[in-house]
Amino acid sequence: MPAENVLLLPGMLCDTRLWSAQARKLEQPVYYADTTSADNFTDMATAVLRDAPPKFALAGLSMGGILAFEIWRQAPQRVTHMALLDTNPHAEKAPRKSRRLEEIGQAAAGGLRELAIEQLKPLYLAESHRDDQVLLDILLDMAMDLGPDVFRSQSLALRDRVDSAPILPSIDCPVLVACGAEDKLCPVEYHTFMAEEIPNATLSIIDNCGHISTLEQPDIVTGLLLDLFQ
């Protein structure tokens, strides 16, 4: 059955610009999740569900995919389709938890731009996109527009998230699992695992693509979403 509405869930320090190419092509009404007002995924999902239509397909990239798992926990009957892009089903590892607090301090002290710049090229983008200034500017502008307070709340949510691996077999709607072949933050093996655990999942690995697949390979991602939602 085709999707009636689409709810788009952005990644950390991203906004509607992350989905600009896809939103233009989707045939369904598009809604955007507000991921800026809570420091944990339980409250974030509750707020998103309060504003979302009664039933919806959803697509989440990175942190948005983690939020998708919590939305499924709270209201599986409302989700008709799910796209999990460049995301992570696992809880935060201890070394990364410690680093989160350091980064929150750096951002609060005025270092958000420096923090974003030092991570964007090596971690977020495929090798061929690391000098794409248009792409880098979009990512940096989103981060700076959202600012250090949102960085703090989203960092805490990611640090304290629960393990979503146990719920994967319960996701019984049509699911797309997709990621960039060069995603260093959420590598291919995470997505292979999810596709194996979710009953109705289709796996797509996108070449020449890192962590930000909606912007790095917009046409491919748009095509995958159109196929899923139809």
Image (cartoon, grey):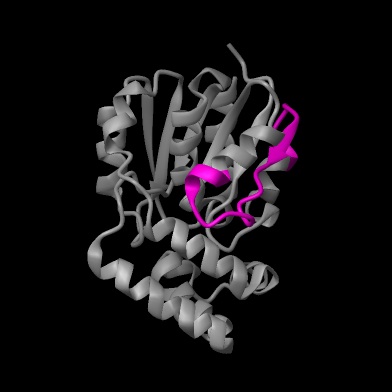
Q: Is residue 73 above or below residue 185?
A: above
- Residue at x 34%, y 46% (from the top left corner): 162
63 left or right, relative to 134: left
Quick one: quadrant of the N terminus?
Answer: top right
Q: Nearer the viewer, residue 137 or 163?
A: 163
Can residue 153 be seen at all in this image of the molecule? yes
Q: Position of residue 41 (x, y in %)?
A: 49, 47
Residue 140 in view here: no
Q: Is residue 87 magenta?
A: no
Where's residue 144, x and y in %?
65, 74
- Is 101 in front, or is 96? 101
**Residue 46 position by quadrant:** top right
Q: Nearer the viewer, residue 185 or 111?
A: 111
- The mark total stands at 0
In the image, is 162 to the left or to the right of 4? left
Residue 12 position, x and y percent, is 53, 59
Q: Is residue 38 or residue 207 the one in the foreground?
A: 38
Residue 114: x and y in percent read: 53, 86
Where 89 sits versus 26, above or below? below
Q: Say if 139 sits above or below 12 in the image.
A: below
**From which residue to which does the magenta span run?**
24-44
Q: Quadrant of residue 170?
A: top left
Q: Is residue 104 above or below residue 207?
A: below
Is 25 part of what is drawn in magenta?
A: yes
Which quarter of the image is occupied by the C terminus? top right
